Amino acid sequence: MIDRRSPTKQLIATAINIAIQTVLLARVTHKYTATPNTISQSVRRTSYDVVMAGKSRRVVPDGIVAHRNAVRQRGGLIAVALALAVLVVGLVLLALPGSLTGLLGFVFTFIALPTMPLFGIPASGGFTLYALSFVSSMLLWWIIGHYASLRAIRAVIASWPEWRQEFRPLAIGLVLGSLISLALAALVLGAL
């Protein structure tokens, strides 16, 4: 359709249309009556989201947002800390005399370092292989913890119980995979 109005009339009609839309939008979003001052203000800020985007969000200590942020930021680190705690317990049990404590210590060490079979441990050893296994295992635990935190913060109210709920099946799967690989290696090598 061809508009046969003059360019001046088109410009005036467009200006009126924009003014009407601005006033209507200002009334809906800001709940005030339009005056010449508020019309010029509503052109700059037409939405609550635009106004809030410029302001920093205040977080209530120990509030919902603070817990969500803590889970998101620290989920991977908590998983690494748990793996390191299990590793320390395993190494202490390995240092104690006795075959039962040695077996439990080795199992705990294997749980904390699930990538040991990828590097051929316990069939072959060496500082380099243990160091690579340590670094890759800690990275793997961090990835699992961070992934669990990202899944946990999908909930409206997210805190550490939701993180544990997401982390538990991932950690159990990783530990069982590591222990099954250990059992298979022991079977193949003839230790069982």
Image: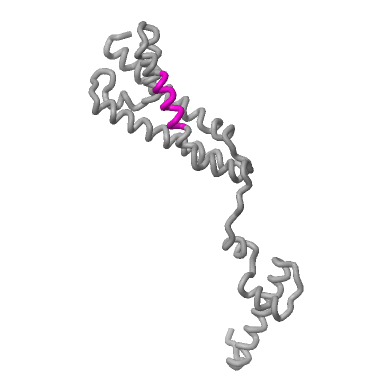
Kindly identify the residue that appears in the image at 54 percent across and 34 percent down. 163
Kindly identify the residue that appears in the image at 60 percent across and 64 percent down. 50
Q: Quadrant of the N terminus?
A: bottom right
Q: Does the segment drawn in magenta span residue 131?
A: no
In the image, residue 152 sits, relative to residue 183, either above or below, namely: below
Q: Quadrant of the C terminus?
A: top left
In the image, residue 158 sits, relative to residue 31, either above or below, namely: above
State which region is magenta.
Answer: 79-89
Q: Which residue is more in the foreground, 120 or 133?
A: 133
In the displayed orientation, state which residue is furthest to the right. Answer: 33
Residue 188 placement: quadrant: top left
In the image, residue 111 sits, relative to residue 2, either above or below, namely: above
Kindly identify the residue that appears in the image at 33 percent across and 29 percent down. 134
Asked if residue 125 lies left or right of residue 96, the reply is left
Q: Position of residue 59 (x, y in %)?
A: 61, 49
Q: Position of residue 29 (x, y in %)?
A: 70, 66
Considering the whole magenta stretch, tell me its main secondary structure: helix
